[in-house]
Structures are given as C-alpha cells and as structure tokens.
Image: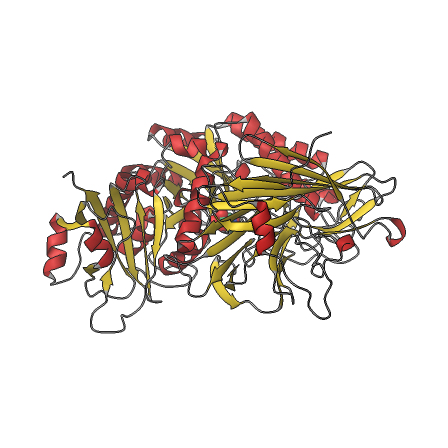
Amino acid sequence: MSTIPPFVRLDGTICTLVIDCRGPAPAVLHWGAKLAKDATGDMLDLAAAREDAPCSPLVAPPLALTPLAGQGFPGRPGLQAHGAGGRRWATYTAIEDVRTGGDGSVEIRSVDAANGIELLHHLALRPDGGVLTGWTQVRNLGSDELVVDWCAAPVLPVPPEMVDWVSFEGRWSGEFQMRTLPRALGALNRENRRGRTSHDAFPALLAQETGAREQAGEVFGWHLGWSGNHATHAETLSDGRAYVQMGELFMPGEMRLAPGAAYRTPTLYAAWSGSGRNGLSSAFHTHIRARPQHRRLRVKPRPVHYNTWEAVYFKHDPARLLQFADAAADMGVERYVLDDGWFKGRRDDKAGLGDWFVDRSIYPDGLHPLAARVLERGMEFGLWVEPEMVNPDSDLFRAHPDWVLGTPPAPQLVFRNQLVLDASRDDVQEYLFERIDALLREYPISYLKWDMNRDLNHPGGADGAAAAHAHVRGLYRLLARVRAAHPGVEVESCASGGGRADLGVLEWTDRVWTSDTNDALDRQFIQRGLSTFLPFELMGAHVGPTDCHITGRRISMATRVATALFGHMGLEVDLLGLAAEERRELAAGIALHKQYRSLIHSGTLLRLDRPANEVAYGVVATDGGQALFSHVMISEQAGYFPGRLRFAGLDAAARYKVSLVWPGQVKSTSPLIAALRDGATFTGDMLMNVGLQLPRQHPQSALIYALTRLTK
Ligand code: DGJ
C-alpha cells in the first residue's frame, strides 16, 4: 500500500503545478506562475476557500484533472462514458495510488470500484523546463463493454484575470491565423471532424490577460499532440471558475472498451508565461528541442531544399529534372525532393495514388539517373509519397476496393479524386510498408515528404464502425515502423500544406510543410502563428515563383528570400526560368541562410509588437552574443516615416555591431542605412529601448539586421 500525499507539487523553471490529492479525485489547486518554496498546498487551499452562496452547493465540486459527473461537476465532465443500459456514467473515484518520478513526473491512479472504471493521470514538468505534459487513461474494470464518448487529457484551470481566448483558425493556404475572443460565461467549443489535424482548427488555445501581447503579459497555452479529430472545450462556469479541456473527438460508438481494455488520450502540452506570448514560445521551443526525436535536427544542419512541385507539377520530364538538379546544386541547395507525379499512372491528380512503383513510361531507367545526379552533385535525394490515399483509378483500388474507409450506402464525397485507405488494417499496413521499404532499399532516398490530401469524410471501417481514431493510430504505427527500419531517413509531415502539423505526428517526423502558399506576405502571418508553438527549424519555408501560384501576388525575390530564410529553407521554383539577377539574389539568400542557420535553428525567437501592417521578429543566441532580426513592411506605411525598430532580448550593457545584411540593395538616402551597410555600434539597451529609425520602404519589402556583441 502506498501512502497518498495530500498534495503533489511540480516545479518548472517559471511555473508551478500543485495537485490536491486529499479528495476522491486529483484536483488542480494551482497552475501558473512559479510559487515560492514555502507556499504550501494548505495555503493554496485556504486562499481558495469561499463562502456559501445562494442557490449553490455548500462545497463546490472540485475542478479535478478529470472533472467527474459523480462529483456533480456543473461543467463538462472530463470523462463521458457509459456501460450497458446507460449505467456506469456517474463516475466517482477514490485515489488509490500516487507515484512520483525523479524527472518531475507523477502518475495518479483513481478507481471507481462501483462502476468499474480506473483513471490514470500522468503529468510531467521537468525542473529545467517550462512545458507541462500529460495524458489521461481510462480503463474498463467492469464486466461489460464501456463506451467512451469523451475523455479529456488532464484538465487545467484558468484564472479569471485571463479575459481573452486566442484561438488558431485558418483554411488551406491560410493556416495558423490567431483570433482573440473575449471570454464570456459559457464555452468556446472548437471541434475538428476532418480526420486530420486540419487547416482550420489547429489544436491549440491561449488564454491571456488584458493587453497581453507578444512581448508582455500573462499568457497560458495548450496544444494537443494529435493528428485526427479533436475538440477543445474552454468554459467559464457561473461560479467564476474556468478550465480548458482538450481531447480526441470520437464518432458515435467509436471508442468502446472491452473488459480490461484501456484508452489513453493524446499528450497535452501546456505552458504558462509572465512575459507575453514570446515567453510561451520560448518554453515550447525549448521543450521541443530537448525531445530525443529532435536530436538529429540538432546534430545536422537542416539541408536547404529544392522541391519540384511548383516548378513542374505533374509534368515530369527526366531531362529537365536533371537540369534542375544541376541548377539547384549550383545555387547551394543541399536536398532535392522529387514531388508528386513520379509513380505509375500519375499524370494528373485523377489516377495513380496507391501504385507506388516508378512510372517506367516516364522514367525508363527508374529514378536511378536522377538520384545518381543528385548525389553526385552533393545533395540528398528525397521523394514525395501519400501512403494513406488511393485513387479509384489505380491498380491497387481495382485489386482491393474493400481497403478504403467508407460509410456505405452513403456515397463518398469527391475530394481531389481520392479515397482514404483504412490504415488500421493489417493488410493495408503490410502493403504500404512493403512498398515504402522497397523504394527506400532500391534508391538512395534519405527523405520522404509524406502527404495527405483529403479529409476523412466517411471514416467507416470494414465492420461498419467508425475508424477515424484507428486510422490515426495506424498512421503512427506505419510511421514508427518505417522509422525503425530506416532510421536515417527523415520524414516531412504534409497535408495539403499545414493540415497535419502537430506534436503527435512530430513524434516520427522531422519537418512540417507549413502551408501550400509560398506567398511571402501570407507566409509572414502563417509562420508567425505557428511559431507560437513550433521552432523555425521544423517549419518548411520555400521561395516560390515570382507570381505566387496561389494568390497571384508578385513579390520581390528579396522579400521571398527574407521570408523563407527564417524557417527550414527551400526553393520551389522553375530554376531554369529565373532571370540571371534573380538567380544571383537567390544564391546570395541561400548563402545568408547558411551563415545564420545554426542561430535561426537554435536561438530564442522574439516576435516584436508592431503596427498591424508590419511583421517583425528576431532570433537571439541563447548567450545573447548574436542576433538576426527581420522587419517586413506588409502594406503602405501610415505616415511619412515608419517608426523605429526596437530590438529585444539583447545584453543591455553590451555594445553590438549592427549590420543591415539583407537585401543587397536598399533604396534609401538615410545616413543610418548607409552606416548600417558597414556596421554601426550601439549599446544593447539603446537598441532595445530607443531603437533604430526604419528607412522608408515600399510595401512588401523586408530588411534583415545582424547583431554581434562586441567584446569589451
Ligand atoms: C499538397 C502539398 O502540400 C504540395 O506541396 C504538393 O506536394 C501536392 N500536395 C502534391 O500533390
């Protein structure tokens, strides 16, 4: 018998979690700012004591890690489950076991003996970290089936001072847009039924105090690491308390637990910051960079990509693709990714998916000549695949029409002419693994761009039950198997751009394709939104064609480079059609990226609060010795002159040499700009508190400043 401590406390670098284990279910007494060592659970309990109020229960049902129906919780129970005949729904547990780990983790087991339900909460907050991770597990201890309609990851409270929610919205080619919504009585519900993480409901939420912004204020953040259906329920109760629940969204009857079986939620990631959204991002980026799977990104510079998609689409001409390889290598590219269109029957998006064999009518010698040239020119070779999908016009579908998800007799919605394979099936897994494995063995492929271009509108499995959850688990299983068999191969998660960018799929992948749009202006906002959670080295960012294929906007090469440079940089353009001047500028941009790549991919990101028509941010080395800042003028400046640019995150007492390193030419008569060409010296405090006057710029232009601390 283990003894149950009255309180469990986890401390990170800047935050503290205190859990009350004295009641029937573990409840959060405090989540937020780090408390002094002397602050006890008893003090927190006393501080929260309230009096009797009319028309209210004498003692408020606690805000448990899983708020329970059996405790009379007036909000959404964290577990909604039932057994035969609608019984076993009013869960009421007793804490049985509390186990703390040396690494800042705790597991709390609670059991509802009468209803035959066990809940396990796992939480971890490393003493040197700022992100709390956690999951909830429900196990059926009864003798009949337990149907789980909802099981939230650990539920965390939100203090009343957090008056705004910030949700992440979007669409294809416009992902990760942040919208502030005033908190009101009742719930904010975001539900995603697209079967993939989605473009429009990135599984994340912020809660902010009045006026909180990038550089200041108290902010809480949540992200669910899951690549399928999900729901966020953020509710303010009439008694003034508020909480956030995130979890998987199940289709009716989708999660049924046989006696003894368990369901574990995806991992929830939560952080707190007292220094604005930048502090939150810093916690997330540090956490992500410390994950073991991030190691290979730390030890090897992220290779600059060339991707063929917007250069050729489905028109694969091997001779031209060889020329691209030469042109890319000449420009400093380090990885060549052959996108969609290389496999059997794939001349457009109407056929071929599923037939993962090189199309010999286009590539008579297979991909060998191209791969060999790519390697000869010192680049890595990468290949596009979309394993979960099949076109009805394919050999695979003709042989196995029963392998697809569907809800017969309802007709399937037409969606890019493709259907979804049921990735939970063993035969589908075997086929896909065999094909991917064979390609990876035959060719020197060290990179897969793993795409997924339709929603799961009809996620029914062979037995007629919903299989959206099982599909995602199947995907993870397949990714893990490919990873284990080919540990040297990196994988990119793409779903029509940023439709599958989450920390679930990033367990087995190394990059996300942030968005299908290469429009540099739109990308400024898309990348800024995602950077709240993900660091730049995970974000694919490409220099696209002169006229953006998606928005039609013409943006200078200088601004396209400046935008892609702060990411995992790549090119996605017809290199043979570029004017000599553009080609030179692009090569210079790649060289600049390489010069600062290790800083961009390891430093602290600081987004600057600027007027709405400007986007500015910088990356500062963790020791403050070096920094790179970008300022983009999106549209016409309001007055005659733009304001000053105040830098951030510098060593206030030190002197920094500041150089304007991009673009090569700036049309300005300002003596400051002339001086910054060679580098000018200022103190850190002056750069942060006074700032440097920006030059007058055309809309759609970008400037990059490099800062180096001078030894005294
Ligand atoms: C969608 C991706 O986001 C694009 O980059 C490209 O790979 C296409 N699919 C190919 O079909």
Residue 327 shown left or right of residue 510 in the figure: left
482 and 417: which is toward the camera: 482
398 and 628: which is toward the camera: 628
Q: Quadrant of residue 234?
A: bottom right
Above-or-below relation of 612 to 294 = below
Residue 559 shown left or right of residue 53 in the figure: left
Q: Residue 174: tell me if it is visible.
A: no
Spot occupied by residue 503 in the image (x, y as percentages of width and height): 53, 43
Q: Quadrant of the C terminus?
A: top left
Residue 33 shown left or right of residue 353 in the figure: left
Can you name the residue that lies furthest to the right here? Answer: 85
Q: Quadrant of the N terminus?
A: top right
219 and 705: which is toward the camera: 219
Residue 396 shown left or right of residue 37 in the figure: right
Spot occupied by residue 114 in the image (x, y as percentages of width and height): 85, 44
**Residue at 44% over, 57% down:** 218
Spot occupied by residue 344 in the image (x, y as percentages of width and height): 57, 40
Above-or-below relation of 570 to 230 = above
Q: Quadrant of residue 638?
A: bottom left
**Residue at 39% over, 57% down:** 214
State the count of labels: 0
172 and 373: which is toward the camera: 172
Q: Residue 619: tell me if it is visible.
A: yes
**Residue at 37% over, 36% down:** 303
Asked which colour scheme the image uses, the reply is secondary structure
Spot occupied by residue 19 in the image (x, y as percentages of width and height): 61, 45
